[in-house]
Image (spheres, grey):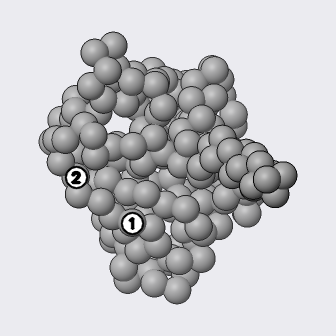
């Protein structure tokens, strides 16, 4: 009987710990407490584990910083994949080789990386498909790529999870899952 109770308690302890995606969603939510000005400027940063100044950033920096809080360096991971498979990544910036300062900060490169190394899920209008810790990409105004992380809290009507992103007002959490055209839906755990 004692062994059964100990086994039960150990299972309860295991199930009480948030899974990876819940931890990612929590890390993203924590970012909303930091004052950040939207700034897409090209910045030379260290490699690996480089970051633009903490008070600046774009939508991709939300994703990068949330993963970094879990000890995952997307700068390095994207760079290493681009070094080996440069032809698989978009060529719209005219680069001839990877650039550790900017590649991981581009939405289309992150979408390519998550497709190659994670799970690409169906992009649809079913709110239940989008779970905390999922990565969502959009096209804003029909031309601007955008990215964010699905958060734990839900909208006021409880119909969909909120999104942590930076679309020009800093790192915020808001009800915007279906505010733009969804172009990608991913889960990535190294």
Say whether residue 39 is left or right of residue 137. Answer: right
Q: Is residue 114 above or below residue 67?
A: below
Q: Residue at x 16, y 41 (%)?
A: 125
In depth, the one of 55 and 147 nearer the eye is 147
Binning the other alpha carbons within 10 Å of mark 2 as few (below 14), some (14 to 19) or many (20 upward) gives some
Q: In the displayed image of the protein, which residue is found farthest to the bottom? A: 84
Q: Quadrant of residue 120?
A: bottom left
Residue 118: x %, y % from top left: 45, 67
Residue 175: x %, y % from top left: 33, 23
Q: In the displayed image of the protein, which residue is found farthest to the top? A: 156
Q: Residue at x 68, y 45 (%)?
A: 12
Q: Read off the residue under disc 1.
A: 119
Q: Quadrant of the C terminus?
A: bottom right
Residue 119: x %, y % from top left: 39, 66
In depth, the one of 102 and 165 nearer the eye is 165
Instruction: Name the mark on residue 123.
Output: 2
């Amino acid at each position: 009987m004692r062994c059964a109770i100990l086994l039960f308690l150990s299972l309860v302890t295991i199930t009480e710990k948030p899974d990876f995606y819940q931890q990612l969603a929590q890390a993203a939510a924590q970012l909303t407490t930091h004052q950040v000005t939207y700034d897409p400027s090209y910045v030379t940063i260290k490699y690996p584990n480089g970051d633009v100044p903490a008070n600046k950033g774009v939508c991709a920096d939300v994703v990068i910083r949330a993963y970094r809080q879990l000890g995952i360096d997307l700068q390095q991971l994207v760079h290493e994949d681009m070094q080996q498979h440069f032809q698989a990544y978009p060529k719209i910036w005219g680069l001839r080789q990877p650039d550790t300062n900017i590649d991981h900060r581009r939405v289309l490169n992150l979408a390519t990386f998550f497709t190659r190394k994670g799970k690409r899920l169906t992009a649809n209008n079913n709110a239940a498909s989008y779970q905390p810790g999922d990565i969502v990409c959009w096209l804003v105004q029909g031309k601007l790529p955008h990215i964010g992380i699905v958060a734990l809290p839900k909208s006021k009507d409880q119909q969909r999870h909120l999104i942590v992103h930076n679309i020009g007002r800093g790192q915020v959490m808001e009800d915007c899952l279906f505010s733009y055209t969804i172009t990608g839906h991913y889960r990535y755990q190294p």
